[in-house]
């Protein structure tokens, strides 16, 4: 009797321990050898697994991609500290995409074909993702892509940890319509695929669902610093809401000139889907005070997962570091991969992919998320109102939204 | 005279058309290096990369013709590289956008980016790219026509030198803005991506990559030969003459503008062929190859190799890109500085590029070799007497080399 | 015209004119330096944009110091920043002439390549020193906001300041080149170096100062630029192609031509961008300029000279 | 019968920003004539040659060569008509050999494709040698033209014109900077080549002018001041006043 009791107790304890430290338990109780988990010739040894990080370290995109690299490295470091994946420490091979799409393709070839990495965390612009996509599909690689993007894509080999366009846009516009009473909209974006697709979706939603009116739609070349004409047009049209997707260096000129022209956000409400904490650092908090952003994540989110994340990030990269939406998405990548690998019990890309859909994570930095069959994530959208100190107050939060990369009726 | 001698004479005449035996041997060496040594030494991944570098050698060779010999510095060679590349990409994209492949779109059968931009039918200028034959013609014809128009407008008005450089740079910049701005028709900043098959043949397999690599090498060698033919003809001499004394050429009864237009068109066509091979080997085309930065980088490939040596330019393009790739893997920050330093060094320290260095150092070595391993060789001496001043019989002939100081 | 009332149209043209004016100022301030360097010395300075960037970064540093260390100086730092931006770029220009350009006179195409290389190096230095992120200066209060000229017409104060700065610089350059002894020396040197030497002009010194002055003006342009946009390592290079076109279009050696062409290009781009998309406005403007240059390669304001 | 006049310049005017470098000038050159144009600096001599060969476009007036109006013709077409022009400073291709210099001037393969597929025939080689002999350079055919002496360069340029067999040869100061011996040989050369063509020469050297000129035209401020035999010109008081006087 005594004996059996001890046994149950020990079983229970072991179960508990296993739940608490699943990877460690797995490694101890059920040692998996490289041959079993590595059926595709990936660079997995008995105690290490190699992954790739592929972002721009040089060139114009280096500004934006730095945060993602930091977040991915942080996540991998944390995973390693917890015992790694399937008992293996993660080794990183980092490559520079140099803000140049062919270079991205070239480096992804290298990572997949020479280094045979088990997964790649990387890319930022749609163009770079489009450039590497055929490579990943041909070599059956695995890419975790962090940026909020235009949707219209779904690949066996890619997981999209940022929001696709409808998640970000529809909730934001609904909010503006309901809470700000916006009826007339002016759409402004940089001239490339993401803003254009986003504005297309926004226009359909405004016209068909909200029964509002789009009074203007404008695109400016990337890097453009002259927004005088646009500001004049906005002044003339006096829309209820300016809906913006201006990116990169143009942002600073855009908000500075808005301010200089006397269009404060009190006078002219504006909602953007492109301004995160990273951008605000460059633009200057005083220039965006009162601006609204529609995002899944803000650094100021009051969630337990986020507090840990922010603290760890600041500990590693200094107190002045800021965390934007994309940085947070990038942080999700290694964790989602780890969970999927462990669920599959293998590094094999097909098995990892098969194990991913349906995975849930309650305490991610931005709260609950779930991986959908379409490789995008279920998540909430929030409206943040920017303050002069460069942080946002979250003024509204949606329900969990199902990702819909090919939205019917919005194409 | 007995028969073998006349035959030898005929052969040597024939070789002189391409710069003499020395140059032909140098081209054979290149052929050996890129078609035998590289494929043996590198795996298919590296070889594919090398193939990409070689496509820049086309542009560099074109620049040797129009800048080195013609004295016309075009800062817009990316335009032509891009036009060639885009023509090829449009064909491949149409093939990839069959109604079955694009069934998910609101308008199946058109390229995906058109669908995203609410286009409902294929624009007229995409129509010819359904046909492979037409595509091949257009790859050459579109850049040729465009270069002709630019050249005609500029050279007939005697715009040259610095002004030509600035204006071609402006045109390159306009082209980029246009391609990015008209993304419904061009794919915008993403470019034309996701190209997988050529007439049903999967271009991403290792075998296909080998085939494309060798095709690219073959085309490059042909272009080098064509270039050699051009610079060793009377026309080539005219180019040098024109650079020295443009007015003298004009007042010797030549239409200088036509001479310039031709060399500019020739350079553009060669670049465009390189662009087409780029698309085939890399699998996409994007506006970043059309812009001013890419175009001026192409000039440095040429300058490093030697602006007066077609063969040198090919080496230059290959080596600079190889260095770029390996340096950027290890020291990404350093690469940009190295590139900048290369620009300055090539202008200040070795304006004749690698070819110049080789000539400086190889000349004495060759002489020493000749003297040490002297063999009785009466034939060439006779040859020289009977076939006087071929433009450039020996590879280190003085006139061509001294031409380098003038720029 | 899209159903605008007459009053609105007037307001549009006024405001568009003013927004074109700020583009005009950037073009002109950059082109002034280029016109001196290219027009007078025949040197193509492709690194000119990086001199602008340097000026902007210097302004940023001064504003950073002012806001961080001596906040009470925030209202007054701007003139100091302009002076320092000028000085910094002037010195760099002087050194560049001394160690690079000097060896390349009469090889304009080579100056083009070498200065492009210099530009690349400078960009990377900026990136390493200031980081890849765009930097934005804290503007003193008196530069913020706008006056409301009428119900619809707002005139931003920083814009007015930039215009004023541009006017002052242009007049200054004009007097320096055409009304001062130094200007005579510069023009004498460029027209006939041997004669100028024989006449006792230290032509090397003149060259060096001319180049440095051109760079210094770019530095001031950079300082002005910070008031309307932010500064990144590649900020200046975005304008270099346009500015060269401005200089060539105006007729390289003509100051008046440079002003006129900067005005024409900036205004047409600005007005067009009201009716078309920004990128098409730019394409059409640049294409027109290139087209005109094909018919009038010597530019707008070059006189017919005996060749 | 062809008219004895080969070149008829009538009422020719060109102005640069209001300054008339050539002002209502008329001039007739006969077949097989050697005409020398003299005049003080700035008289418009070089501009006159520029106008005839098309380098500068006339503001007004006409230039008739045989029956062709030259004022609207492109430079290369004027050369094809049979007008050759030597520049004041020797313009030769310094990076090519003497042989190549002459061969390039041979009037064949003048179009782009013609020059690409140009083939050297024995006739061309012979012609080049013949000309080289005429200009005293037959021993230097293989020499790079940049290595020639100043006088030899002048001859080479004349040779490059001769090989085109022009009906009108225009020479801008052919003996400037030459030694006495070279000058004599140049005079001899000119006399030899002017037997079946007209030659229009600009020259300052009066002894040389006397040696070669059939007729002399004196330009002053873009206008013809006097015209006639050298002896008459030297006696002309106005000429002495503006030109020979100092």
Image (cartoon, coloured by chain):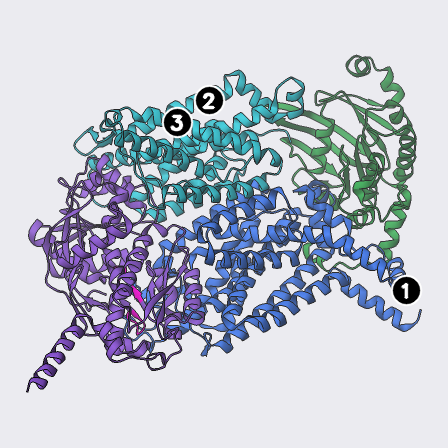
Residue indicated by mark 1: B376
Q: Which mark is residue D123?
A: none
Q: Which mark is residue C174?
A: 2
Q: Colour of chain A?
A: purple
Residue lying at 59% horizontally and 27% vertically, measured from the top left: C190
Q: Which element type, helix, strand or loop, lies under badge 2?
A: helix
Q: Which residues are magenta?
A: A144-158
Q: Residue D32: tell me if it is visible.
A: yes
With respect to residue D208, does A339 lie above or below? below
Q: Is residue A157 magenta?
A: yes
Q: Which mark is residue C84?
A: 3
Which quarter of the picture shows residue B210? bottom right
Q: Which element type, helix, strand or loop, lies under badge 3?
A: helix
- Residue C58 position in % (x across, y down): 37, 33
Q: Colour of chain B?
A: blue
Mark 3 is surrounded, within 10 Å at the Cα level, by few (under 14), some (14 to 19) or many (20 or more) other residues, namely many
């Amino acid at each position: 009797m005594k004996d059996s009791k001890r046994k149950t107790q020990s079983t229970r304890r072991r179960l508990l321990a296993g739940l608490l430290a699943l990877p460690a338990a797995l490694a101890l109780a059920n040692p998996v050898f490289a041959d079993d988990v590595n059926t595709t010739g990936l660079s997995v040894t008995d105690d290490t697994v190699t992954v790739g990080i592929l972002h721009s370290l040089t060139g114009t995109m280096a500004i934006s991609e730095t945060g993602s690299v930091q977040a991915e490295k942080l996540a991998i470091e944390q995973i390693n500290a917890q015992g790694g994946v399937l008992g293996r420490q993660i080794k990183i091979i980092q490559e520079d995409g140099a803000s140049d799409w062919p270079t991205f393709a070239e480096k992804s070839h290298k990572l997949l074909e020479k280094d045979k990495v088990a997964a790649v965390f990387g890319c930022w612009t749609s163009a770079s993702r489009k450039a590497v996509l055929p490579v990943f599909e041909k070599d059956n690689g695995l890419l975790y892509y962090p940026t909020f993007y235009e949707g219209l894509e779904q690949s066996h080999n890619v997981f999209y940890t940022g929001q696709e366009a409808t998640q970000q846009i529809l909730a934001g516009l609904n909010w503006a319509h309901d809470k700000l009473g916006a009826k007339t909209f002016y759409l402004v974006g940089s001239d490339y695929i993401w803003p254009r697709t986003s504005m297309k979706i926004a226009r359909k939603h405004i016209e068909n669902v909200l029964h509002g009116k789009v009074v203007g739609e404008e695109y400016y070349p990337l890097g453009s610093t002259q927004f005088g004409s646009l500001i004049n047009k906005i002044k003339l049209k006096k829309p209820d809401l300016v809906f913006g997707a201006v990116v990169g260096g143009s942002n600073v000129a855009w908000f500075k000139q808005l301010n200089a022209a006397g269009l404060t956000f009190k006078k002219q409400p504006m909602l953007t889907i492109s301004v995160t904490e990273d951008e605000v650092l460059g633009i200057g908090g005083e220039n965006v005070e009162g601006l609204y952003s529609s995002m899944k994540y803000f650094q100021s989110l009051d969630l337990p997962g986020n507090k840990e994340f922010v603290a760890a990030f600041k500990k590693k990269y200094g107190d002045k570091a800021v965390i934007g939406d994309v940085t947070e998405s990038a942080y999700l990548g290694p964790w989602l991969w780890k969970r999927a690998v462990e669920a599959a019990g293998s590094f094999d890309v097909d098995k990892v992919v098969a194990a991913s859909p349906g995975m849930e994570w309650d305490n991610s930095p931005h709260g609950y998320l779930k991986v959908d069959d379409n490789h995008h994530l279920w998540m909430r959208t929030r409206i943040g109102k920017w303050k002069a100190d460069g942080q946002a107050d979250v003024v509204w939060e949606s329900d969990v939204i199902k990702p819909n990369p090919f939205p019917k009726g919005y194409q | 005279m007995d028969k073998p001698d006349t035959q030898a004479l005929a052969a040597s005449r024939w070789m002189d058309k391409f710069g003499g035996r020395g140059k032909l041997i140098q081209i054979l060496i290149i052929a050996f290096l890129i078609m035998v040594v590289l494929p043996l030494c590198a795996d298919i991944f590296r070889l594919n990369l090398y193939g990409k570098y070689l496509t820049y050698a086309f542009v560099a060779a074109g620049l040797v013709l129009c800048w080195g010999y013609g004295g016309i510095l075009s800062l817009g060679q990316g335009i032509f590289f891009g036009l060639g590349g885009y023509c090829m990409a449009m064909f491949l994209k149409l093939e990839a956008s069959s109604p079955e492949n694009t069934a998910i779109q609101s308008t199946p059968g058109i390229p995906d980016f058109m669908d995203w931009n609410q286009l409902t039918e294929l624009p007229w200028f995409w129509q010819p790219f359904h046909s492979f034959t037409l595509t091949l013609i257009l790859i050459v014809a579109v850049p040729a026509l465009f270069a002709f128009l630019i050249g005609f407008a500029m050279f007939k008005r005697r715009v040259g030198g610095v002004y030509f450089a600035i204006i071609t740079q402006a045109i390159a910049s306009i082209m980029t803005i246009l391609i990015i701005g008209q993304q419904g028709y061009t794919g915008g900043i993403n470019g034309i991506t996701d190209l997988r098959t050529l007439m049903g043949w999967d271009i991403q397999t290792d075998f296909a990559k080998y085939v494309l690599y060798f095709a690219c090498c073959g085309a490059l060698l042909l272009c080098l030969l064509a270039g050699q033919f051009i610079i060793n003809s009377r026309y080539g001499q005219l180019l040098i003459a024109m650079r020295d004394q443009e007015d003298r050429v004009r007042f010797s009864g030549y239409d200088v503008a036509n001479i310039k237009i031709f060399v500019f068109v020739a350079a553009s066509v060669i670049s465009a062929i390189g662009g087409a091979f780029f698309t085939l080997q890399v699998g996409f085309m994007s506006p970043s190859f059309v812009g001013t930065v890419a175009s001026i980088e192409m000039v440095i490939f040429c300058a490093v190799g030697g602006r007066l040596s077609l063969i040198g330019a090919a080496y230059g393009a290959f080596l600079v890109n190889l260095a770029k790739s390996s340096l950027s893997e290890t020291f990404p920050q350093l690469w940009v500085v190295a590139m900048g330093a290369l620009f300055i060094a090539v202008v200040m320290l070795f304006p004749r590029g690698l070819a110049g260095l080789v000539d400086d150092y190889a000349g004495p070595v060759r002489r020493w070799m000749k003297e040490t391993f002297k063999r009785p060789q009466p034939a060439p001496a006779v040859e020289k007497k009977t076939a006087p001043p071929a433009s450039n019989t020996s590879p280190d002939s003085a006139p061509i080399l001294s031409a380098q100081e003038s720029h | 015209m899209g159903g605008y009332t007459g009053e609105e149209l007037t307001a549009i043209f006024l405001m568009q004119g003013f927004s074109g004016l700020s583009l005009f100022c950037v073009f002109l301030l950059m082109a002034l330096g280029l016109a001196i360097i290219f027009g007078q010395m025949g040197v193509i300075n492709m690194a000119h944009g990086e001199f602008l960037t340097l000026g902007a970064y210097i302004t940023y540093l001064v504003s950073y110091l002012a806001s961080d260390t001596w906040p009470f100086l925030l209202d007054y730092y701007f003139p100091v920043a302009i002076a320092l931006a000028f000085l910094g770029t002037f010195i760099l220009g002087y050194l560049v002439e001394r160690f690079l350009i000097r060896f390349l006179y009469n090889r304009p195409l080579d100056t083009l390549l070498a200065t492009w290389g210099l530009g690349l190096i400078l960009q990377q230095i900026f990136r390493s020193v200031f980081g890849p992120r765009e930097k934005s200066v804290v503007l003193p209060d008196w530069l913020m906001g706008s006056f409301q000229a009428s119900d619809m017409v707002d005139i931003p104060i920083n814009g007015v300041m930039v215009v004023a700065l541009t006017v002052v610089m242009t007049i200054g350059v004009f007097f320096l080149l055409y009304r001062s002894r130094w200007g005579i020396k510069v023009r004498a040197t460029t027209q006939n170096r041997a004669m100028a030497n024989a006449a006792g002009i230290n032509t090397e010194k003149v060259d060096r100062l001319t180049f440095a002055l051109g760079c210094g003006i770019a530095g001031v342009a950079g300082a002005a630029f910070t008031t309307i946009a932010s500064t990144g390592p590649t900020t200046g290079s975005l304008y270099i192609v346009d500015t060269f076109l401005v200089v060539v279009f105006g007729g390289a050696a003509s100051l008046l031509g440079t002003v006129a062409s900067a005005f024409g290009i900036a205004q047409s781009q600005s007005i067009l961008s009201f009716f078309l998309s920004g990128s098409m406005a730019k394409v059409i403007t640049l294409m027109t300029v290139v087209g005109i240059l094909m018919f009038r390669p010597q530019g707008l304001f070059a006189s017919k000279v005996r060749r | 019968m062809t008219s004895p006049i080969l070149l008829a310049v009538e009422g020719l005017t060109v102005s640069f920003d209001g300054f008339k470098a050539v002002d209502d000038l008329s001039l007739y050159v006969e077949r097989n004539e050697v005409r020398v144009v003299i005049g003080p600096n700035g008289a418009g001599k070089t501009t006159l040659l520029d106008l005839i060969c098309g380098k500068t476009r006339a503001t007004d007036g006409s230039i008739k060569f045989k029956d062709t109006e030259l004022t609207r013709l492109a430079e290369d077409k004027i050369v094809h008509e049979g007008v050759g022009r030597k520049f004041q400073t020797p313009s030769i291709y310094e990076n090519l050999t003497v042989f190549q210099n002459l061969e390039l001037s041979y009037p064949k393969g003048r179009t782009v494709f013609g020059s690409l597929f140009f083939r050297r025939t024995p006739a061309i080689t012979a012609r080049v040698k013949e000309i080289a002999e005429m200009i005293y350079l037959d021993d230097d055919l293989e020499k790079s033209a940049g290595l020639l002496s100043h006088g030899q360069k002048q001859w080479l340029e004349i040779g490059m014109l001769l090989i085109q067999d022009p009906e009108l040869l225009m020479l801008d100061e052919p003996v400037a900077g030459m030694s006495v011996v070279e000058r004599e040989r140049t005079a001899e050369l000119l006399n030899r080549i002017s037997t079946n063509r007209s030659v229009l020469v600009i020259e300052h050297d009066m002894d040389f002018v006397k040696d070669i000129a059939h007729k002399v035209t004196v330009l002053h401020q873009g206008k013809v001041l006097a015209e006639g035999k050298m002896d008459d010109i030297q006696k002309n008081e106005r000429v002495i006043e503006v030109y020979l006087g100092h």
